[in-house]
Amino acid sequence: MEDKRYPLPPFTTETALQKVQIAEDAWNSKDPEKVSLAYSTDTEWRNRTEFLNGREEVKQFLTRKWKKELDYKLKKELWGFRENRMAVRFEYEWHDDSGNWFRSYGNELWEFDENGLMKKRFASINDLPIKEQERKLR
């Protein structure tokens, strides 16, 4: 049996906003182990063109991600919700090992199980090259 990750569905406006903030805070920690615990052991992901199955694949993906996306800073915003599902828009900034900066924009669709663990995450993301002085997330 997996642990519960509060707040649990069905969501209210207040608990949906809390869930999004918890996710933002966790991702900004850049700790793959910590972040992966928010997902069910059989979670299904689409991130850009990559398809992941299971918490272990998520952890490996996040480890690779934050080795590539340096000085990562994320902001999430609740777009809508219903019962155990949410739509979230986000943007994050990062640079590669050559010092090229990017702002990445995207949308996520989330589905949670009864324990509040994310069972499905589908993300569409676009990258915009920016200059370091154009950063707005710090």
Image (tube, rainbow, N blue to C red):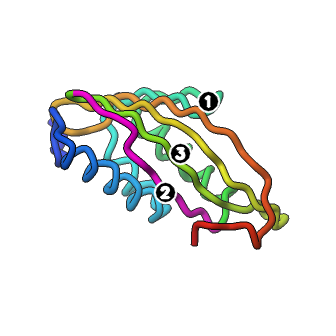
**Does 37 sit above or below residue 75?**
above
Report the Cα–Cα distance between label 1 and label 2. 22 Å
Q: Nearer the viewer, mark 3 or mark 2?
A: 2
Residue 38 % position (x, y): 32, 46
**Does 126 sit above or below residue 50?**
below
Mark 1 burial class by Cα count in 10 Å: few <14, some 14-19, many 20+? few
Q: Nearer the viewer, mark 1 or mark 2?
A: 2
Q: Secondary structure at mark 1?
A: strand
Q: Earlier in the sequence, mark 3 or mark 2?
A: 3
**Numbered range of the magenta stretch:** 71-82
Residue 80 % position (x, y): 34, 35
Report the Cα–Cα distance between label 3 and label 1. 12 Å
Residue toward you, 25 or 134: 134
The residue beneath circle 1 is 50
Q: Which mark is residue 75?
A: 2
In terms of secondary structure, what is the magenta stretch mainly?
A: strand
Q: Secondary structure at mark 2?
A: strand
- Residue type marked 2: Lys
Mark 2 burial class by Cα count in 10 Å: few <14, some 14-19, many 20+? some
Q: Residue furthest right?
A: 98
Q: Nearer the viewer, mark 3 or mark 1?
A: 1
- Residue type marked 3: Gln
Q: Does 46 appear in magenta?
A: no
Mark 1 and mark 3 in contact (Cβ < 8 Å)? Answer: no
Q: Earlier in the sequence, mark 1 or mark 2?
A: 1
Left or right of 110 on screen, residue 128 = right
Residue drawn at 38 percent across, 61 percent down: 25
Residue drawn at 59 percent across, 55 percent down: 92
Q: Secondary structure at mark 3?
A: helix
**Does 35 sit above or below residue 51?**
below
